[in-house]
Amino acid sequence: MRIALVGQPNCGKSTLFNQVAGYKAETGNFSGTTVTFTESKIRVAGEVEELVDLPGTYTLIGTNPAESETQRYLASNQVDVIINIIDATHLIQGLELTLELLELKRPMVVGLNMMDEAMRIGLSIDGFELGKKLGVKVLPLIASRGQGVKNLFLAALQAAHHDESDIKVSPYSVVGEERHKQAAELARLISRQGSRRISWRDNLDDFLLHPVWGYFALIAILFLFFQIVYGLGSVIEGPVLKFFDQTSLAIINNLSQTSFWSQMLVGVIQGLSGGFAIVLPYLVPFLLGLSIMEDAGYLPRVAFLMDNLMHRLGLHGKAIVPFILGYGCNVPAVMSTRILEEKQDRFLAAALSVLVPCAARLSVVFGLVAFYLGPMWALGIYVFNIFVIATTGRILTHILVDDSPGLILEIPVYRAPTIKAVLSKVWFRIREFIVEAWPLLIVGSVFLALLNYFNVSQFLNILVRPFTWVLGLPSETGVPLMFGILRKELSLVMLRQALGVVDFSSALPSLQMLTFTVFVVFYIPCLPTLATLKKELGGRNMLMIAGFTLVVALVASLIARGIGSILLS
């Protein structure tokens, strides 16, 4: 049996999915498209069922590719029962989708999520009465705490086992252009608005979303965030690097320094040390902090603030959501552009989102700039990155003659992140590095050791020399930059190996560290992102974006070099 989770964005649908699937899920594509869904096997009342989390959708009319595929999927015979999740604090909007779902004449149950928030704002909902009017079971739910989850899935199982002829088509399902009025009338009949108390959350938003103080708060929060990430990472990086360097030295002393096997072993150790000492010490606290801000509800508020700021600079408003996602990984950032209706909008949003420094680039920013120049320089790179994206967006909107449409964004309530959800989310993201990126780090380090052993690396460095020469970088940085296209972490780990030093400052002046880092932040996206760009936009657009990022990286690096030559002198 296949159970489909359907709901509007920010209704808590994916929170429910993660509660029952435990982040043990697979992502697949709808047939013939690149729009994805997430699925997992779950056990309900002793039976193993398939659960699919469909993309968040406001309507089944199909105004964008994700909504069209969701409608097609639900209309097919692949779904045995629908669990429709509604945000109880946005009842009318949620019921509009519910009324559309009823027209499919599929077994369905409704989960009224965020009931705790509804109570907080003084809203009481008669779920039993709503169920009678809709002809389906309506159950209360607090997905973030796991309350009501078992009853909801048991009800879904029961609904699926009913004969299709037993399913009512409620009089409310015969809806066309009157659907919004019908939903509003339904909400009026089954809910009652009590007195709402002004809480600390309301006062907090008055400050965090203020047109002036909100930006000061954002800078202060980011500064604190960077200080914590840098502080934890730098404490770990030094001792761990020292341990691995001593191990490498012991191998070289026991074996001939120029022997083939000693070079290979040292390559493996440097690949391992790159993960343990350079990437994970910064990546783990960064993803932990990002998950906390995401679950607490602050990231959508950042998007709101940045949208207002970017519009003043001419940036496409709808690029903000991929822009925020890009700080975790550019792949989902590019994938999220599929919710945009126009191809031009998707191209523009994708081109801008790949310029955002993802978590992989974080290791370069912190492992090189923050560690040797200080955390304020790392924060400066992120601020500079926003400036470059805004300027680039302004230029592109003029070239593409875009009208810069606004951003429609649902601001969720503040919530206290649960430890289980945050740790599960961090592990889900860290696992990608461990399974996919770390083996590449080790293989790449061994491969570079081979290149050095056979004196081949100098020829590859010649191929990249036009770029490194313009940027004032040593020729040895060529191979690390080439490997950085596979995974951005490789560029830093292999730089240490290519320069043959333990301490970067002994081979690279501060200005070169800054220039190298800024170039890595902007230049050609990693291989997985390029593959995603090809799937979403086609090979021609993928090559155009890759070339575009290379030009942006060169210009931005030269500007950063000029600024650095003044401030670092």
Image (cartoon, rainbow, N blue to C red):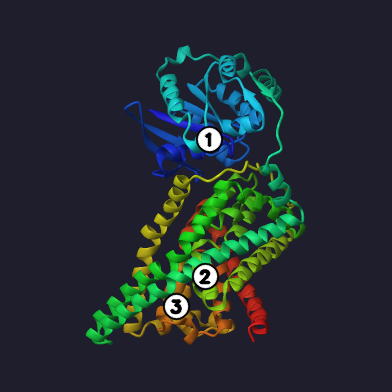
Mark 1, residue position: 70
Using the image, determine if residue 322 lies above or below residue 559: above
- Which of pointers 2 and 1 indicates the residue nearer the eye? 2
Question: Quick one: SS at disc 2?
Answer: helix
Mark linked to residue 366: 2
- Farthest-out residue, left: 254
Residue 411 locus on image (x, y percent): 65, 43
Image quarter for residue 349? bottom right
Q: Quadrant of the C terminus?
A: bottom right
Disc 3 residue type? Leu
Residue 158 locus on image (x, y percent): 41, 20
Using the image, determine if residue 164 lies above or below residue 492: above
- Which of pointers 3 and 1 indicates the residue nearer the eye? 3
Which callout, 2 or 1, points at the residue further toward the start of the chain? 1
Q: Residues within 10 Å of mark 3 (few under 14, many from 20)?
A: many
Residue 263 visible in the current orientation: yes
- Residue drawn at x 48%, y 49% as measured from the top left: 422
Mark linked to residue 282: none
Query: Relative to 528, is 218 on the left or the right?
Result: right
Query: Relative to 220, is 54 on the left or the right?
Result: left
Mark 3, residue position: 495
Disc 2 residue type? Phe
